[in-house]
């Protein structure tokens, strides 16, 4: 079933508008109780940016000439958030894990997984951005 252009635009705008409050919080244009924040404001801003950029990409469509660049920036943003969690995330925020391991070992595994995901995101971002600037970068026909 193919979505109509109107539904796609509504979906895109939903994502754009969902991200805006988080961007405004990070810019301190929207007040929030500091006690409820468990990450730096730049991380909150990037999370909002991820939502909004996703909506922009849907509006532009898959044939956009800047698709690779925006995709690279999007995946780079995922990597920044994952990298922050891996390096600076509060250990009490990690849950789950294996019952046979200590909490410290489970936290180390969680940091490794987030860090590995961040490195993978960085590699994908570099590849996507390189695609954008290669000669004869033609969007899909």
Image (spheres, helix red, strand yellow):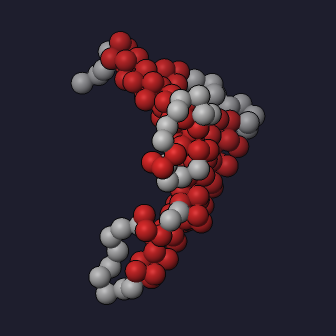
Q: Position of residue 64 (x, y in %)?
A: 57, 23
Q: Position of residue 1 (x, y in %)?
A: 24, 24
| In-front residue for pair 122/15 | 15
Total marks placed? 0
Question: Which quadrant of the structure image shows residue 66?
Answer: top right
> Is 84 above or below relative to 105?
above
Q: Position of residue 129 (x, y in %)?
A: 68, 41
The residue that appears at 52% across and 45% down in the rendered structure is 34
The residue that appears at 54% across and 52% down in the rendered structure is 39
| In-front residue for pair 27/10 | 27
Question: Which quadrant of the structure image shows residue 110?
Answer: bottom left
| In-front residue for pair 60/94 | 94
Please indicate, yes or no, whether residue 4 appears anywhere in the rendered image: yes
Please indicate, yes or no, whether residue 75 appears anywhere in the rendered image: no
The residue that appears at 39% across and 24% down in the rendered structure is 14
Judged from this view, the residue extending furthest toward the top is 6
Q: Position of residue 55 (x, y in %)?
A: 47, 27
> Is 107 above or below relative to 45?
below
> Is 4 above or below relative to 69?
above
Horizontal side of 132 relative to 124 (left or right) equals: right
| In-front residue for pair 39/108 | 39
Judged from this view, the residue extending furthest toward the left is 1
Question: Which quadrant of the structure image shows residue 2?
Answer: top left
Horizontal side of 106 relative to 27 (left or right) equals: left
The residue that appears at 35% across and 12% down in the rendered structure is 6
Horizontal side of 87 relative to 20 (left or right) equals: right
């Amino acid at each position: 079933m193919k979505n109509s252009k109107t539904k796609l635009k509504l979906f895109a705008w939903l994502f754009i508008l969902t991200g805006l409050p988080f961007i405004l919080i990070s810019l301190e244009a929207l007040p929030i109780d500091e006690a409820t924040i468990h990450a730096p404001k730049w991380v909150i801003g990037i999370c909002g940016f991820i939502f909004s950029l996703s909506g922009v990409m849907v509006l532009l469509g898959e044939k956009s000439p800047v698709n690779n660049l925006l995709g690279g920036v999007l995946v780079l943003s995922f990597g920044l958030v994952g990298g922050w969690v891996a390096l600076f995330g509060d250990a009490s925020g990690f849950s789950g894990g294996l019952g046979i391991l200590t909490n410290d070992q489970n936290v180390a595994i969680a940091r490794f997984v987030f860090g590995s995901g961040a490195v993978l995101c960085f590699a994908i971002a570099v590849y996507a951005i390189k695609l954008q600037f290669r000669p004869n970068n033609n969007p899909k026909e």
